[in-house]
Amino acid sequence: MNLHEFQAKELFESYDLPVSKRGLIRKLSDVDNAIASIDFSNGCVAKVQAHTGGRGKVGGVKLCKNKEEIENFVSSWLGKNIITNQTDEVGLPVNIVSIDELTDIDSELYMSLIVDRADKCVSMIVSKAGGMNIEEVAETNPEKILKLKFKHNVQVSEQDINELSSKLDFNSNQTEQFKKIVKNTHKLFVEKDLSLLEINPLVITSSGELHCLDAKINVDENALYRQEEILGQRDPSQEDQREYEAKQHDLSYVSLDGNIGCMVNGAGLAMGTMDTIKLYDGEPANFLDVGGTATKERVGEAFKLILSDKNVKGILVNIFGGIVRCDLIAEGIIGAINEIDVNVPIVVRLQGNMSDEGKILLNNSGLNVIGEDSLMKASQKIVELVK
Ligand code: GDP
Ligand code: MN
């Protein structure tokens, strides 16, 4: 789960990390209060709040000298979508603008912490070449990207930070500040179950201080049960609506670009199903695992979810009944088709527990559902039908 920049900065503040003071604007009439809540003597930087980076490149971050410039920025963004190189072509809705106290920048660095699955540790990535083109730097000058790995429950060693600081050309004052930033981001990362914490740019100000100008936080979804406060900050408007719906029903769903909706039980089988669709030159519209304990209700929800994607031109249901009973799945399918208007072809493969009973139910339902026993044939069939 992602947080907005302003929410991440609030967390940063509570971990004593240096961020700019800010005021929030949700409607034009909030501008006066927002200005009054910060030191506006040097102007401010107005920033669109949306779950994406790359805002600077599309005018979503702007230095404003006076109230009028802020109002123009706010009117031009509130209620619109921001489209960046990190969003899809629809973009994300802008409902909040933050105005941050202005920082004079000497240089921009990059810093992040991520969960390093391969080495079962936390990886810190730092670069002197921070700012808006960090992705390019990683590709063209990978030697400019420095890494430090540490155990999640062990303090980072002074020596490691000293070495890194000298590579980053920090003076002694900056090295001390950097130590504090590493220590506190690490603490935040572990205590709040983050999977990503990114500061881009981490800047050196004109007076030589380290300061976090941007803040991005991603929280591990699997830990949200124990991060109630963070969960309360979820902003559904920034999430894929179908993926959000799916979460509410405990379905594991990822939307994709193709036109064949997939409903499968088990992540491995779902991957295999997507592979066979591709083998026959089809494109899956989604990954969907209804789980090993799929109930009739959840299958119904899953079906509605798939059909809410207007790109879907056909559906492949592939269920292997182990614990789950195929006849219940069949009832779920029939129930869903009867409830919603389905006008795309559906191919169903049921195998295993009570599959014969399931097939009979589907055959007798009078619905236009095509049964196939083999996965290869079922995939081939649905690809043919959507063409
Ligand atoms: P992003 O493009 O979505 O990652 O948004 P950022 O928060 O990183 O802002 C983009 C760029 O705006 C930064 O790389 C800075 O160059 C610039 N910027 C942001 N805040 C300030 C500020 O307080 N002062 C100055 N001078 N530039 C800023
Ligand atoms: Mn940034």
Image (tube, rainbow, N blue to C red):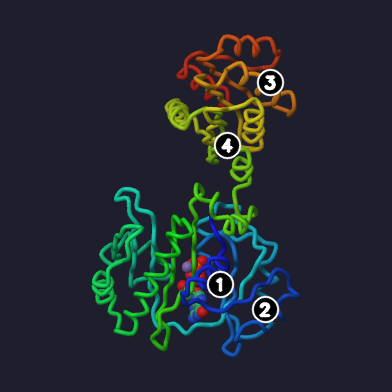
**Nearer-N-terminus badge (2/1):** 2
Residue 135 horizontal/vertical position (percent): 39, 61
Question: Which residue is at a point 65% across and 73% down the rendered structure image?
Answer: 24
Q: Which residue is mark 3?
A: 334
Report the amino acid beneath label 3: Ile
On residue 251, the disc is 4
Is the CB of the residue bearing disc 4 within 8 angstroms of ligand 1? no
Residue 127 shown left or right of residue 38 in the figure: left
Report the amino acid beneath label 1: Val
Residue 363 shown left or right of residue 185 in the figure: right
Mark-to-mark CA distance, 2 and 1: 16 Å
**Nearer-N-terminus badge (3/2):** 2
**Nearer-N-terminus badge (4/1):** 1
Report the amino acid beneath label 4: Leu
Residue 246 shown left or right of residue 190 in the figure: right
Residue 286 shown left or right of residue 236 in the figure: left
Question: Which residue is at a point 53% across and 41% down the rendered structure image?
Answer: 254
Mark-to-mark CA distance, 3 and 1: 50 Å
Question: Which residue is at a point 61% across and 72% down the rendered structure image?
Answer: 98
Is the CB of the residue bearing disc 3 within 8 angstroms of ligand 1? no
Question: Which residue is at a point 43% across and 28% down the rendered structure image?
Answer: 272
Label 1 near label 2: C-beta < 8 Å? no
Select label 4 or label 2 by which is in front: 4
Element type where label 2 sits in the image: helix
Label 2 near label 4: C-beta < 8 Å? no
Residue 36 horizontal/vertical position (percent): 67, 84
Mark-to-mark CA distance, 3 and 4: 19 Å
On residue 34, the disc is 2
